[in-house]
Image (cartoon, helix red, strand yellow):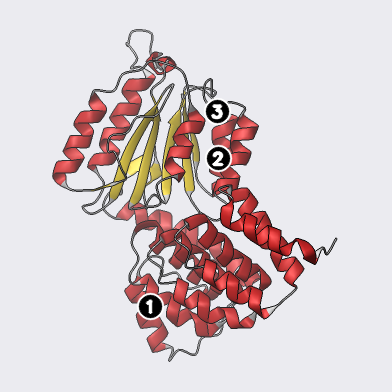
């Protein structure tokens, strides 16, 4: 309605509300009512250094949506922010500008990144230039130097043609190099990982037999074996935690993620070996736990049944809630359905750009 008299009430609510969805709606509504007012843009900028991750990222996304040319310098500054999710929003905002002069700050920051964020930078640079240098920041740097900084960006339709060839090249590169960490066949490229594993009572069900004579392992046996192998293959320095869930969530490490070393990996593997299957399936609480840890950028989620307990058990409502939480977070959710085909796990992976696999 263009009701500018509501601006003060909206701004008060923005400072008071704890609801991420309400904050996002308020920022967009206030931008509409202020209609390009410079004082509002200055206020939005102050929110981009707010201590609350969601409010900071939502404000940065709103500035990107408005698309003012003077926001480029702000995005370049936030590209160096200590929180990975803020850097990701700044990176994608700069990429949307499709400006060759922005390649240099992207490549400079890429040299400070590891794991999934290094891959995100490489993908953005490939989408802009068509160059197949992947995660190799030093190669990107050398290439831009050799070009004298004068690079013509590739048309998007041309990049699309190259994308398939690049995917094939990556597969060959993976097969010819040292074994990468994997979990149920899904590559672990992140170094900020949370493993969420269903340990409800149904995980004690045996897997399908390959032969009549063999005694099949239980779903729990398979999950623990894969989890121990994945943890053992994580590189030194990788941050990780494990969150088994049934009726509630428990964690291997309280208060965040652990820095991977030979000792911590061995401790985690021993802890995993003692897990037992019992109780219901509180999928929603496990996901909320993950989103409350600002260090985690990638989830590996395994379950074998529909949600049965918790604040939300309807798969569609869980999907909608997690999509809202992930709007300005950029968390990637890879999911594994063991013994069953679970639509909610497919949705979570699809919505976040992750991978979904089924294990029978």
Of the two numbered discs 2 and 1 on the same chain, state the one appearing first in sequence. Answer: 1
Say which residue appears at 50% left-offset and 46% top-offset.
Answer: 354
Label 1 secondary element:
helix
The answer, for residue 161, to whether it is visible in the render is no
Say which residue appears at 22% left-offset and 36% top-offset.
Answer: 268
Above or below residue 266? Residue 31 is below
Above or below residue 65? Residue 333 is above
Disc on res. 108: 1
Read off the residue under disc 3: 311
The picture quadrant where one finds residue 40 is bottom right
Between the C-alphas of marks 3 and 2, the distance is 18 Å
Q: Position of residue 256 (x, y in %)?
A: 32, 45
Label 3 secondary element:
loop
Above or below residue 147? Residue 82 is above
Q: Position of residue 205 (x, y in %)?
A: 41, 13
Between the C-alphas of marks 2 and 1, the distance is 33 Å
Disc on res. 85: none
Q: Residues within 10 Å of mark 3 (few under 14, many from 20)?
A: few
Q: Position of residue 356 (x, y in %)?
A: 51, 39
Q: Residues within 10 Å of mark 2 (few under 14, many from 20)?
A: many
Between the C-alphas of marks 1 and 3, the distance is 44 Å
Of the two numbered discs 1 and 3 on the same chain, state the one appearing first in sequence. Answer: 1
Read off the residue under disc 2: 348
């Amino acid at each position: 309605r263009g009701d500018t008299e509501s601006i003060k009430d909206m701004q008060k609510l923005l400072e008071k509300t704890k609801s991420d969805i309400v904050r996002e709606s308020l920022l967009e509504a206030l931008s509409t009512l202020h209609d390009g007012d410079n004082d509002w843009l200055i206020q939005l900028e102050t929110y981009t250094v707010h201590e609350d991750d969601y409010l900071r990222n939502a404000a940065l996304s709103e500035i990107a949506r408005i698309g003012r040319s003077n926001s480029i310098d702000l995005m370049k500054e936030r590209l160096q922010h200590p929180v990975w999710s803020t850097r990701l929003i700044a990176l994608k905002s700069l990429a949307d500008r499709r400006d060759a002069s922005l390649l240099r700050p992207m490549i400079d920051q890429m040299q400070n990144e590891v794991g999934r964020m290094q891959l995100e930078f490489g993908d953005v640079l490939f989408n802009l230039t068509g160059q197949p240098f992947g995660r190799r920041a030093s190669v990107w740097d050398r290439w831009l130097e050799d070009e004298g900084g004068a690079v013509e960006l590739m048309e998007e339709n041309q990049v699309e043609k190259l994308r398939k060839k690049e995917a094939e090249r990556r597969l060959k590169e993976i097969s010819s190099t040292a074994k990468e960490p994997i979990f149920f066949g899904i590559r672990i490229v992140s170094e900020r990982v949370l493993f969420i594993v269903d340990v409800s009572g149904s995980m004690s069900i045996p897997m399908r037999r390959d032969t009549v004579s063999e005694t099949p392992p239980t779903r729990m046996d398979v999950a623990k074996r894969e989890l121990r192998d994945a943890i053992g293959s994580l590189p030194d320095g990788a941050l990780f935690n494990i969150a088994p869930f049934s009726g509630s969530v428990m964690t291997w490490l309280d208060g965040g993620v652990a820095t991977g070393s030979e000792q911590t990996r061995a401790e985690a593997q021993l802890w995993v070996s003692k897990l037992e299957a019992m109780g219901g399936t509180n999928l929603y609480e496990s996901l909320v736990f993950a989103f409350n840890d600002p260090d985690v950028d990638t989830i590996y989620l395994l379950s074998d049944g529909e949600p049965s307990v918790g604040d939300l058990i309807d798969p569609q409502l869980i999907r909608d809630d997690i999509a809202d939480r992930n709007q300005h977070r950029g968390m990637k959710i890879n999911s594994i359905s063991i013994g069953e085909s679970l639509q909610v796990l497919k949705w979570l992976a699809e919505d976040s750009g992750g991978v979904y696999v089924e294990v029978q």
